């Protein structure tokens, strides 16, 4: 299996948050799929704080990434952002098993483009 995207690995490793949605329109130019995959493979974002704080930071980071990358990759990342924002809004700041499944599905979609 290919090396997982660092930003996605942070999410999977922390197992702290999760949810989904559609990308918002962006006024800034988007990266190509190739550039997007390269960017994701070099992303070193690391959240800090409590579980809720980490979930919120991850959701915000995913939102920022979704606004930059190619639309094919932005859609699943936007979904991951939405999931993480829901997790941050939860009482515990931890992902449910359903949210983890949704996050893995979105990671798989990214993996289809970044091989």
Image (cartoon, rainbow, N blue to C red):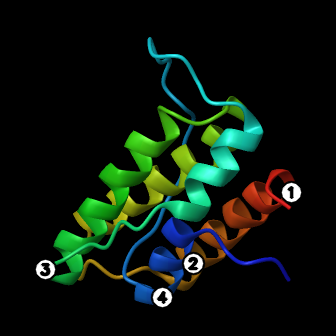
Inter-mark Cα distance, 3 to 4: 15 Å
Disc 2 target residue: 100
- Picture coordinates of residue 22, whole percent (x, y): 57, 35
**Mark sitting earlier along the chain (1/4):** 4
- Picture coordinates of residue 88, whole percent (x, y): 26, 66
Disc 3 vs disc 2: which is toward the camera? 3
Task: Kindly identify the residue that appears in the image at 38 percent across and 41 percent down.
Answer: 64
Label 4 element class: helix
* Relative side of 110 to 100, left or right: right
Farthest residue in the left direction? Answer: 49
Disc 3 target residue: 49
Disc 1 target residue: 112
The relative height of residue 105 versus residue 37 in the rendered view (above or below) is below
Inter-mark Cα distance, 2 to 1: 19 Å
Label 3 element class: loop
**Mark sitting earlier along the chain (3/2):** 3
**Mark sitting earlier along the chain (1/3):** 3
């Amino acid at each position: 299996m290919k090396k997982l995207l660092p930003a996605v690995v942070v999410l999977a490793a922390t197992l702290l948050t999760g949810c989904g949605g559609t990308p918002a329109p962006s006024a800034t130019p988007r990266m190509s799929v190739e550039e997007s995959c390269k960017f994701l493979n070099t992303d070193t974002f690391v959240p800090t704080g409590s579980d809720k704080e980490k979930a919120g930071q991850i959701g915000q980071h995913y939102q920022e990434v979704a606004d930059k990358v190619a639309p094919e990759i932005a859609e699943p990342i936007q979904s991951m952002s939405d999931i993480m924002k829901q997790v941050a809004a939860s009482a515990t700041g931890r992902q449910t098993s359903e949210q983890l499944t949704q996050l893995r599905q979105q990671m798989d979609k990214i993996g289809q483009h970044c091989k």
